[in-house]
Structure formats: structure tokens, C-alpha cells
Image (spheres, rainbow, N blue to C red):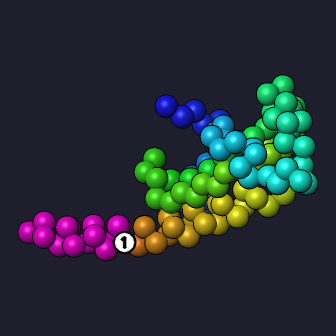
Amino acid sequence: MRYWDTLLEEQRQGFTIIVDKSWEDIPIRDLFDDTCYDIDEMNDKVNRGDLDWFMLRARVLLDGHELGESIVGGFLYEDAREVLRDGTAEDLIYEAMHEARGEARRLVGSLNKVLDTLAV
């Protein structure tokens, strides 16, 4: 089971926005060029807790129901909360909100069809 650590939870435009992080499964070596970076040093810093190697997720919920989600991995920061200040989280929130709006429209249409069949 994957554990997610919440970095942000807030209300926007009637939706609940949650931004959280989880450990990254992909080795650093697979995403960074060892001719430009000292991969062993990066791994050591992650293992010591000096760097955070993680996946980032943004979710959009309405009344506790998830309508949109965006996940990106391969983030390496000294402090994962930096993603809340540098625009990274906002990019994921934007994508998740776009998905949520489309899903909300689809659900409204489906619910209207169901409700029409229940009319007395």
C-alpha cells in the first residue's frame, strides 16, 4: 500500500484540492544523467534525508468524490513543500481541475438521464 503525505488541502471554486507526495519508485539513476550529476551523492543525500525523492499528486474532489487527478514523478527537492511555491503544484492542480470539470459535466448529464426515468 502506498502512503501519501498531504502537502496542501484547500477549497477552490467549490472543489476540495489535495496535493500530496509519495516516495518515488524509479531509481534516480534512471532519470538523471550521470555525466552531469553525481548520482551516488544524490542517492546518499536521499537516504540521509537531505533530499526528498518523490512523486507528486493533485486531486480534485467534490463532496468526497474524486473527479480529477494528476500525478508526476521524479521530483528531487531539499524540501518537497517547495513545489507549492515554484508553480509545480499549480500545474498539476490545473490538469486535475480540467479533468474534474469534464467529469462533473459528464456526471450531470448521466444523473439527469437517470432522474428523467424516475419522474412520476
Which residue, as the protein is rendered here, is positioned at the far top? Answer: 48
Is residue 15 among the parts visible in the rendering?
no
Determine whether 15 is above or below 81 in the image.
Answer: below
Name the residue carrying label 1.
Answer: 106
Residue at 64% x, 66% y is: 94
- Identify the amino acid type marked 1: Arg
Looking at this view, is 50 or 97 the one in front?
50
Which residue, as the protein is rendered here, is positioned at the far left? Answer: 120
Q: Residues within 10 Å of mark 1 (few under 14, many from 20)?
A: few
Determine whether 30 is above or below 112 in the image.
Answer: above
Which quadrant holds the C terminus? bottom left
Q: Which residues make up the magenta segment?
A: 106-120
Looking at this view, is 87 or 34 the one in front?
34
Side of 7 relative to 77 (left or right): left
Looking at this view, is 92 or 112 the one in front?
92
Relative image position of residue 79 (x, y in whole percent)? 84, 40
Determine whether 2 is above or below 96 in the image.
Answer: above
13 part of magenta stretch: no
